[in-house]
Image (cartoon, rainbow, N blue to C red):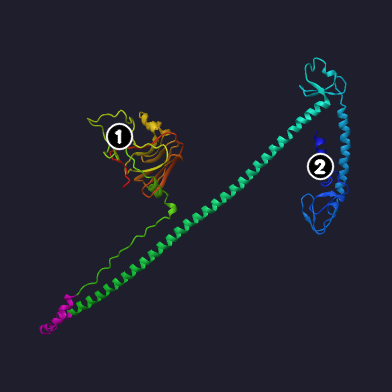
Amino acid sequence: MGGEGAVAKLQTEINCPICLDNLRDPVTIKCGHNFCRSCIERSWADVQDRFPCPVCHHLCKERHLWSNTQLGRMVDMVKLLQITGAKVKQQEERRLCEKHNQALTLFCEEDLKLCSSLCTQPPDHQDHHIRPVEEAASHHRQKVRSYIEPLKKQLVDLQKLLATQVRQRSELREKVEKQRVKLASEYGSVIASIECEQAAVHSRLAAQEKHILRNLTANKAAFSDHISKLRFLRKEMAETSVVSGVKLLMNIKGVLPRCDNLEPPDVYCLQYKREEFSLPPQCSALLQIMQTFREEVTLDPETAHANLLVSEDKKSMTFVRKKQGVHWNPKGFGDDPVVLGSEGFDCGRHYWEVQVDDKPEWAVGVCTDSLSKERKQPLLRQENRCWTIQLQDGDYVTQGPVSVTLVLQEMPRGIGIYLDYEMGHVSFYSLNDMSHIHSFRDTFSEVLKPYFNVGCDPKPLTIRALKD
């Protein structure tokens, strides 16, 4: 079948696109397509200046035909192969049964096998559906042909999908390139803004320095002039003090006022204005978060550990040693000095701030509401339901699905917590300089509550109010 297929495919290649028969006296035109000489001459018979190719419609400027003798020999070879193939096919059709040495004139539908009349006798093909070769071939030929259109449709659909994939790939390249150009423009804008701000600050600093130096120089000259006057007057007074009494008294009226009315110049008070660096708007994400999503968060005393003292305004908590008269809270956390926020979040974006100052131990963040119903578990077994940052034994550590030890340049005195429920983000910011500390990415399915671990030192942990 492989040889027949190759011959059939070769047959289509040696056919003339005009008469659809084997090429006779094949010629090649300028675009590379081949035709029978007589066919292409008839096709161009009524054309004057431009000669279109019947296949690709390429316009040839001249009526040039190149004889293709090699292709002519190939046509002769294919004809020979066709004759040989026909003889082989006839021999195959007269193939005999190896077992009974009879012509294979029947076909078994159950075994899908050619057989002779003797093959149908029991027990080989007993109760099988046997039909003549011509009838079976016609049936199966129709069955094979029935697959052509569905396969053709599948091919068309897949080609469309492939074209869509190619188009999406091209669109992706365009989007990425546009994004790259946009980011480059934005980065360039930020850099240009920073450079412009830097140049303006340097210019103001230079002008301020020049103004101060000019005033200092003038003040220095005034002091130098006054010192010279003092030296001259001192010398004059020394000389006057040793003259005779009559001469002294004759000039005393002009001498004394000169000494009494001496006033030194004012000392120039240097007033240096400190220049501040302001970032462009693109770098102020935290400020936008604060302004848009900041909200009031309060403590839930019902969840507080027995040693925690919650303030009346439910904004501050302090660890205290247990005293007489202090009753244990059965609803509070039993092992860790923890208290939760009153607010529960199951959607949206929220931001609040906690003042930690110089406390040696603390932890802030969010936890699942179910944790408040299982308060007996220590913190180490709560990591998969808490997303927090904590200070413990001098180290800043994140507690959550992944624990990370953080290296901070400066000890934060306040922590900003930002929750984006739908995106699964919990982010922490240092309120010292509005810098980002760490972010968790996870998937939330429960109500989340603000989480506060006060530590066992007596310094308070305070939620900053909106007015702060």
Residue that badge 2 annotates? 12
Task: Indicate left or right for 140 with 435 as reference.
Answer: right
Main SS, magenta residues: helix
Image point (26%, 68%), residue name: 267
Is residue 393 part of the magenta span, yes or no?
no
The residue labelled by disc 1 is: 301
Q: CA distance from mark 2 to mark 1?
A: 89 Å
108 relative to 188, above or below: above
Specify the quadrant of the image occupied by residue 369: top left
Foreground residue, 86 or 3?
Answer: 86
Single out the residue that lies furthest toward the front. Answer: 46
Q: Is residue 246 magenta?
A: yes
Residue 56: x %, y % from top left: 76, 50
Residue found 74% across the figure and 32% down from its top: 146
Amino acid type, residue under disc 2 in the picture: Thr
Q: Residue 300, position in %: x, y?
A: 32, 35
- Kindly check if marks 2 and 1 are in contact, taking CB atoms under 8 A apart as contact: no
Q: Residues within 10 Å of mark 1 (few under 14, many from 20)?
A: many
- Quarter of the N terminus within the rendering: top right
Q: Eyeballing the image, is 100 above or below 440?
A: above
- Where does the magenta region start and end? 238-261
User: SS at mark 1?
Assistant: helix
Q: Type of residue at label 1?
A: Pro
